[in-house]
Image (cartoon, rainbow, N blue to C red):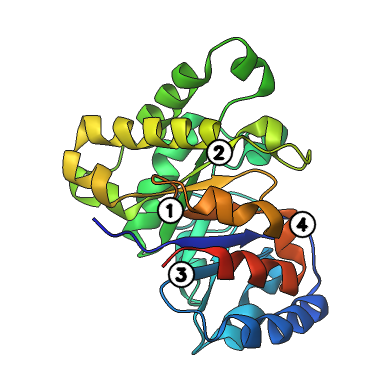
Amino acid sequence: MARTPLIAGNWKMYKTEREAEEYIQALLPRVSAVDGVDVALCVPFTDLRAMVDSARGSRVEIYAQNMHHEPEGPYTGEISAPMLTELDVRGVVLGHSERRAMFGETDKALALKVPAALEAGMVPILCVGETEEERDSGETDRKLRQQVRDDLAGVSLERLADVVIAYEPIWAIGTGRVASPEQAQESIAFIRALVGDRERQAAESVRVLYGGSVKPDNAAELLALPDVDGALVGGASLQADSFAAIVASAPR
């Protein structure tokens, strides 16, 4: 089954609104003629409205980087799905390793957030992946099995294929290291098989991205792997030209 590649840039805590506006004006002409690829920018909360307005009518969709599972409530500092959808935000990154490691985001919380995003009509990008210690000790499959099982527990079989899963080996995020094509393919195929354990048809349709030091010079090789359906791009997404080059590398 053909799966449309998704190239998503995760800006993390970079770019003021002014800087974001300069970026989007530089990016849009570079990707306007690229067909057969979905493109998303995952931007800080303060940039969301400006980016949605500037990208409207283009092929670039705007995603958030986190959300709370409740639609409202006494959760100081949090943002809800209705707040995002009111701005026409189309998706949200959930469970990024930095959220898990630095801010204590748990699989229990993600089991609530992922279905909440789907119910709100947004595309959830669920991040999963192992640490360097887990990789070296042969624990990669165990870690991925636990995360996929627990984080998708609240998603119905009918909606499984609507989740995007990003495999991000934590040891390759912001380090300059990158999983070998063999490592990336093996882990992403394993994630697809885990989805298939719940629903075979969903496994054929679900998009699984690779994230971890993706750059223009390694993107084409990674994106050509049979089970890789795109990339979650960190540092290389902060420059319009390098992000556009990665978008152009996606097979279609």
Residue at point 66% right, 65% down?
43
Q: At x 53% / y 62%, what residue is drawn?
A: 7
Name the foreground residue: 229 vs 92. Answer: 229
Distance, label 1 to label 3, CA atoms, is: 10 Å
Alpha carbon separation for disc pair 4 and 1 = 25 Å
Q: Quick check: 161 above or below 237? A: above
What separation in Å lies between label 3 and label 4 (alpha carbons)? 23 Å
For marks 1 and 3, give the one nearer the viewer: 1
**Disc 4 target residue:** 13
N-term mark: 1 or 3: 3
Q: Earlier in the sequence, mark 4 or mark 2?
A: 4
* Residue at position x 70%, y 46% in the image: 213
**In the image, residue 191 lies at what x, y percent?**
39, 34
Amino acid beneath label 2: Pro
- Which three-letter amino acid code belongs to the residue tagged 4? Met
Instruction: State the residue position of label 1.
Output: 229
Checking the image for residue 107, the label placed there is none
Q: Name the residue under label 3.
A: 38
Q: Which residue lies furthest to the top in this view?
A: 137
Asked if residue 142 is positioned above or below residue 111 in the image, the reply reads above
Left or right side of 197 for 221 = right
Badge 3 element? strand
